[in-house]
């Protein structure tokens, strides 16, 4: 599988469902989930959780509040599935910078 052949893979939306479950150490999303409709956010968050290995990490740099452009970080329904390791705002976008470790 491609996941086993490479250290890093940039995944386009068309192949996210093909990534094997529990095969990824780190998933990163930067400045896009906060601008998607709720159904798309839920879709990606479910797949990120599915793909991550136990104790894998999810790094997010996204806006924190919902508005007319999309769903903010504080409205995502996944936080009980992760242990927060980092939460800060010191970045050029002024977005919530969050790192969570997957818990079972």
Image: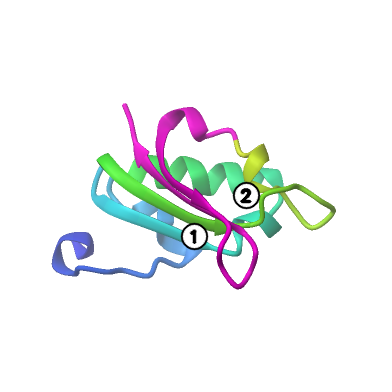
Give the numbered dot on residue 3: none
Which residue is nearer to you in this view: 11 or 98?
98
Residue 90, picture quadrant? bottom right
Quadrant that contains the N terminus: bottom left
Image position of 53 with respect to 32: above or below: above
Is 103 displayed left or right of 97 in the figure?
left
Image position of 45 with respect to 79: above or below: below
Which residue is nearer to you in this view: 101 or 23?
101
Is 57 displayed left or right of 59 in the figure?
left
Residue 81, picture quadrant? top left
Task: Say if the magenta span includes residue 51.
Answer: no
Image point (60%, 47%), residue name: 41
The residue segment tinted magenta is 77-104
Quadrant that contains the C terminus: top left
Q: Which residue is mark 1?
A: 29
Task: Say if the magenta span includes residue 79.
Answer: yes
Binning the other alpha carbons within 10 Å of mark 2 as few (below 14), some (14 to 19) or many (20 upward) gives few
Q: Position of residue 4 (x, y in %)?
A: 15, 61
**In this view, which residue lies farthest toward the left?**
5
Q: Position of residue 84 (x, y in %)?
A: 43, 39
Give the numbered dot on residue 40: 2
**In what element is the residue under mark 2?**
helix
Binning the other alpha carbons within 10 Å of mark 1 as few (below 14), some (14 to 19) or many (20 upward) gives some
Image point (61%, 39%), residue name: 76
Upstream in the sequence, badge 1 or badge 2?
A: 1
């Amino acid at each position: 599988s491609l996941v086993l052949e490479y250290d890093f893979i940039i995944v386009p939306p068309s192949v996210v469902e093909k990534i094997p479950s529990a095969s990824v150490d780190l998933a990163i999303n930067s400045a896009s989930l906060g601008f998607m409709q709720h159904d798309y956010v839920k879709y990606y968050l479910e797949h990120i959780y599915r793909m991550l290995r136990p104790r894998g990490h999810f790094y997010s740099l996204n806006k924190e509040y919902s508005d007319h452009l999309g769903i903010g970080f504080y409205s995502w329904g996944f936080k009980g599935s992760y242990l927060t390791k980092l939460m800060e705002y010191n970045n050029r976008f002024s977005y919530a910078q969050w790192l969570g470790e997957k818990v079972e």
